[in-house]
Image: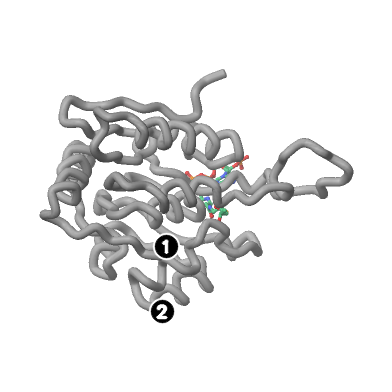
């Protein structure tokens, strides 16, 4: 089976953890367990100083695969969605003692954006699309987005985005403080790397939104 996330550690000590579930890097329990495992691995390595999270093929993540929400669990005993909290990934990010930066290109929706919100900074391209779009499926953001988004963008803007499943592009996201900086696609990872090292060296603030 193809790995759902990949890790590469650069000579500068920044690990890039890439979500690898094309075409939209949708999240599932498997993808999130793989993400958690690779982030924990990077956090425990002495040669890793900071972590950048991104998505493969120019797409951060379009959120949870909503087809997994269909149907009742019935008498299943295996640990599946509905039997377990899916916040295990954001719990890991929250507990991290190394800088975490999200490098966002393409869609960052629902759980995808919530993973980015749990990082200490977000860098995006100007054309990236960001939103907590869960309500269009009749569900609430489930990875802490209802708490983290208002802390970054203020309550009125967060309510507008959540209640109307409103999407913003990278440019607007920077204006409302949802992303910290904009970079062209070919420089995105480089800028995110530098931002992570700047947090480490205290040249940029270590911002925890929850
Ligand atoms: C825990 C969390 O809080 C819960 C969540 O994350 S809920 C999920 C939130 N995510 C979203 O709202 C994203 C919704 N998707 C989109 O906006 C758009 O599909 C997109 C921008 C990703 C891609 O757009 P576009 O390129 O025009 O392709 P589009 O035709 O819409 O989608 C392609 C296929 O992917 C599927 N898809 C897209 N997002 C999906 C998702 N989150 N779950 C399951 N399937 C999805 C579509 O249903 C479609 O399937 P089909 O080919 O069988 O009809």
- Identify the image quadrant of residue 38: top left
Q: Is residue 45 visible?
A: yes
- Label 2: which secondary element: helix
Q: Quadrant of the C terminus?
A: bottom left
Label 2 Cα crowd, 10 Å radius (few <14 / some 14-19 / many 20+): some
Whether the residues at callouts 1 and 2 have beta carbons within 8 Å, the answer is no
| 103 left or right, relative to 74 | left
Label 1 Cα crowd, 10 Å radius (few <14 / some 14-19 / many 20+): many
Q: Is residue 108 visible?
A: no
The residue at the point 40 percent across, 55 percent down is 118
Q: Which mark is residue 72?
A: none
Total number of numbered discs in the rendering: 2
Q: Which residue is mark 1?
A: 167
State the image coordinates of residue 205 (x, y, percent, origin top left): 19, 60
Which residue reaches farthest right? 75
State the image coordinates of residue 123 (x, y, percent, origin top left): 25, 51
Mark 1 / mark 2, whichever is N-terminal: 2
Q: Marks 1/2: CA distance?
A: 16 Å
Q: Nearer the viewer, residue 66 or 16?
A: 16
State the image coordinates of residue 66 (x, y, percent, origin top left): 63, 48
- Label 1: which secondary element: loop
Q: Nearer the viewer, residue 137 or 40?
A: 40
| 18 left or right, relative to 137 | left
State the image coordinates of residue 67 (x, y, percent, origin top left): 67, 45
Q: Which residue is mark 2?
A: 155
Q: Classify 187 as above or below 85.
A: above
Indicate yes or no: mark 1 CB to ligand 1 under 8 Å. Answer: yes
| 149 left or right, relative to 33 | left
The residue at the point 31 percent across, 25 percent down is 8
């Amino acid at each position: 089976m193809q790995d759902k996330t990949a890790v590469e550690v650069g000579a500068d000590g920044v690990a890039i953890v890439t979500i690898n579930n094309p075409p939209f890097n949708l999240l599932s329990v498997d993808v999130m367990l793989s993400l958690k495992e690779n982030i924990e691995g990077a956090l425990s390595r002495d040669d890793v100083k900071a972590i950048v999270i991104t998505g493969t093929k120019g797409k951060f993540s379009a959120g949870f695969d909503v087809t997994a929400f269909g149907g009742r669990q019935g008498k299943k005993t295996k640990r599946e969605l509905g039997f377990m909290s899916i916040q295990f990934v954001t719990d890991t990010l929250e507990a991290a003692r190394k800088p975490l930066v999200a490098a966002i290109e393409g869609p960052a929706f629902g759980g995808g954006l919530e993973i980015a919100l749990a990082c200490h900074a977000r860098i995006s391209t100007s054309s990236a699309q960001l939103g907590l779009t869960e309500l269009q499926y009749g569900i609430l953001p489930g990875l802490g987005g209802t708490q983290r988004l208002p802390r970054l963008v203020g309550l009125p803007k967060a309510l507008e985005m959540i209640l109307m499943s409103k999407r913003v592009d990278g440019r607007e996201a920077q204006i409302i403080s949802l992303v910290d900086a904009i970079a062209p696609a070919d420089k995105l990872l480089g800028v995110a790397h530098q931002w992570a090292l700047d947090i480490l060296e205290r040249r940029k603030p270590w911002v925890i939104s929850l």
